[in-house]
Image: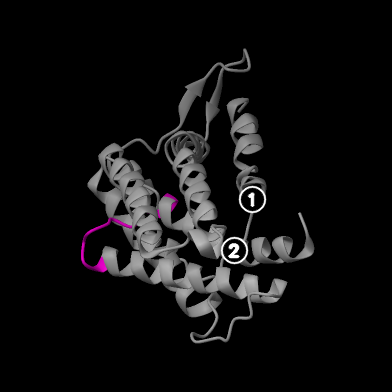
Amino acid sequence: MDDEEAYILLLLSDSNLPTGAFVASAGLESYVAHGFFQRIPSTSTGMQSEVDPSIDFLRNSLATYAHSALPFVSDTHEIVDAFLALPSDDFSADTSADTLNHIKALDDLYEAMTLNHVTRRASKSQGVALLTLYAKGFSKPPHFQVDLSTSSGLQTQRTDRAAKLVEKLKLDVRREKSHGHLPICWAVLTSCLGLSLGAIRSLLSPVIPIMLSLSFL
């Protein structure tokens, strides 16, 4: 991981970043309302003890998200990466449409797998917030002159493609042609920012030790 990737990851990890996450509690409010937020007995350590309900909720939430969302992040990131890396000779309106269709197919599958309507609504709100964040905060101004004979020119070309892809995806979400779920849009955002899949996994990797540590509580 280079310094630029590390810097972007730090930005994305900032709780002040307007990602829309404040609109959702990951189901915590419903968890409390239905009476599950109470201490429960645990014998995982061989000793009778009580598990704090917040730890129990966090453990289950992380496990669910790791198994449901992360595969979609990986697949979408690979699709967008391949699209942005296409040589100019292979790039066309058809390839752009095909990429959006592949993204939409994953978005539709995630919609079908997310049965809770509250979770669906929160995921969509945060997803479109990420697309808006890229469009307003990370993309370069339009109509840049691109000299493809230089490495900076190729990078500008990639950035231009990324901006157009995000705008088209945002438009599809507004027209309700696509759902814009959080894992899908997160993958689009990070790929357009030039983050590798390995870098994203390093950002998400704290989930694993947290889950392991919680399993012993």
The type of residue carrying mark 2 is Leu
Which type of secondary structure does the marked residue at label 2 adopt?
helix
From the top left corner, tell me how far across and down residue 11 is, in percent.
63, 67
Q: Nearer the viewer, residue 33 or 6?
A: 6
From the top left corner, tell me how far across and down residue 210 is, in percent.
62, 38
Q: Earlier in the sequence, mark 1 or mark 2?
A: 2
Name the residue tied to disc 2.
12
- At a point 65% along the width and 60% down the height, the residue shown is 9
Specify start and end residues of the magenta stretch as a single range: 174-183
Q: Nearer the viewer, residue 134 or 146?
A: 146
113 magenta-colored: no
Q: Is residue 14 visible?
A: yes
- At a point 41% along the width and 35% down the height, the residue shown is 38
From the top left corner, tell me how far across and down residue 150 is, in percent.
71, 75
Q: Nearer the viewer, residue 160 or 139?
A: 160
Q: Determine whether, in the image, residue 14 is placed left or right of residue 143.
A: right
Which type of secondary structure does the marked residue at label 1 adopt?
helix
- At a point 54% along the width and 54% down the height, the residue shown is 81
Near mark 1 (Cα within 10 A), the count class, few <14, some 14-19 or many ≥20, is: some
Near mark 2 (Cα within 10 A), the count class, few <14, some 14-19 or many ≥20, is: some
- Furthest toward the front, the residue is 89
Q: Is residue 162 above or below residue 57?
A: below
Dividing the image into 4 quarters, which one contains the C terminus? top right
Measured in 3D between alpha carbons, the distance from the residue under mark 1 to the one under mark 2, in whole angstroms, is 9 Å
Q: Are marks 1 and 2 in contact (CB under 8 Å)?
A: yes
Q: Quadrant of residue 2?
A: bottom right
Name the residue tied to disc 1.
203
From the top left corner, tell me how far across and down residue 195 is, in percent.
63, 57
